[in-house]
Image: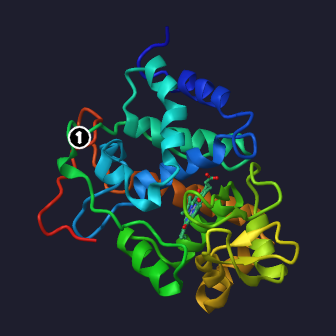
Amino acid sequence: MSKEGDYAAVAEAIRKIIPKEGYDDGSAGPVLVRLAWHASGTYDKASDTGGSNGATMRYKLEADDGANSGLEYARAFLEPIKQQFPWISYADLWTFAGTVALEYMGGPKIQWKPGRVDYADDSNVPPNGRLPDGAQGADHLRHIFYRMGFNDQEIVALSGAHNLGRTHANRSGFDGPWVPNPTRFSNTYFKLLLNEEWYEGKSPAGVRQFYDEDKDLMMLPTDMALIEDPKFRSWVEKYAKDKDAFYEDFAKVFAKLLELGIKRGPDGKAVVNVLKAEAKL
Ligand code: ZEM
């Protein structure tokens, strides 16, 4: 039996469930990183609502947001860990698992703090539509990420997570991985964005996306926006050249993402983020 607060034991248990024969590229790692991101990326700075506190994706309203399609796998993969360590909140487990998975796949060490609580009902679930839509462009990326409190450099650094995992025709409509080795963190995504020829095409589900010459790899319209927009592009160029700078900046911005909207009381527990009537998209 593990003691309450033994996060090393939780991390060890998470590492054991990451290799997954028969699922995607044999790894639960990428979808766990995506769960941590989508749990956190609903944050709206102006109304101070949303974010990872509360684990509100347990509720149908948020789980059914089209952007969260496929994350039921990640939540299900983590369920046995929750059973094994009932003292950890879902909100902490989902964000912590993202950091453990990232490190497992060769990414940088992420500073992560516990204390998130699980809301008892769905009254503080943020509205659908706060997460980015891959079919759009640079203006949309700024609209979505400025709302969370990020700048252009942070948008590009965060997007480097597309070095991991893949898109699924039956989840988002897009199809394929961004890089040849999608279970190993690296700055390959930035190098490919700059150095490959990208051809506009349609996924099997009929969605507009970009392919490399062999049609093995893909980019979303929002990924392409990072090289079309000059301000974004300068950061892509930096991270393609300087892997250490990317790792350092990614570690900072991913830690910031997981902390959005979290205010801890004197007992270390996060305070409920009350959804105000005026809180909109
Ligand atoms: Zn993603 N992402 N993302 N992303 N993402 C997908 C998959 C993954 C966008 C997006 O539309 C999509 C960030 C930012 C953005 C990951 C991490 C992070 C998919 C494919 C789409 C469509 C879903 C599917 O079909 O399964 C857009 C528009 C973004 C704006 C910049 C950020 C930030 C991330 C983390 C820091 C990861 C790891 C995946 C792969 C998931 C998997 O199941 O393999």
User: Observer-nearest residue: 41 or 260?
Assistant: 41
Residue lying farthest to the left in this orientation: 277
Q: Is 88 on the left-hand or right-hand side of 177?
A: left
Residue depicted at 17% across the width and 53% down the height: 274
Q: Residues within 10 Å of mark 1 (few under 14, many from 20)?
A: few
Q: Position of residue 162 (x, y in %)?
A: 66, 62
Residue depicted at 83% across the width and 59% down the height: 180
- The quarter of the image holding the C terminus is bottom left
User: Observer-nearest residue: 23 or 47?
Assistant: 23
Residue depicted at 78% across the width and 82% down the height: 198
Ligand 1 closer than 8 Å to label 1 CB: no
- The kind of residue on which mark 1 rests is Gly
User: Observer-nearest residue: 102 or 23?
Assistant: 23
Q: Quadrant of ligand 1?
A: bottom right
Q: How is the image coloured?
A: rainbow
Number of numbered labels in the structure image: 1
Q: Position of residue 269 (x, y in %)?
A: 28, 36
Residue assigned mark 1: 265
Residue depicted at 62% across the width and 67% down the height: 174
Residue 272 position (above or below residue 130): above
Q: Position of residue 159 (x, y in %)?
A: 60, 67
Q: Is 158 on the left-hand or right-hand side of 268?
A: right
User: Observer-nearest residue: 78 or 201?
Assistant: 201
Q: Position of residue 275 (x, y in %)?
A: 18, 57
Quarter-of-image position of residue 46: bottom left
Residue lying farthest to the right in this orientation: 214
Element under label 1? Answer: loop
Residue 266 position (above or below residue 143): above
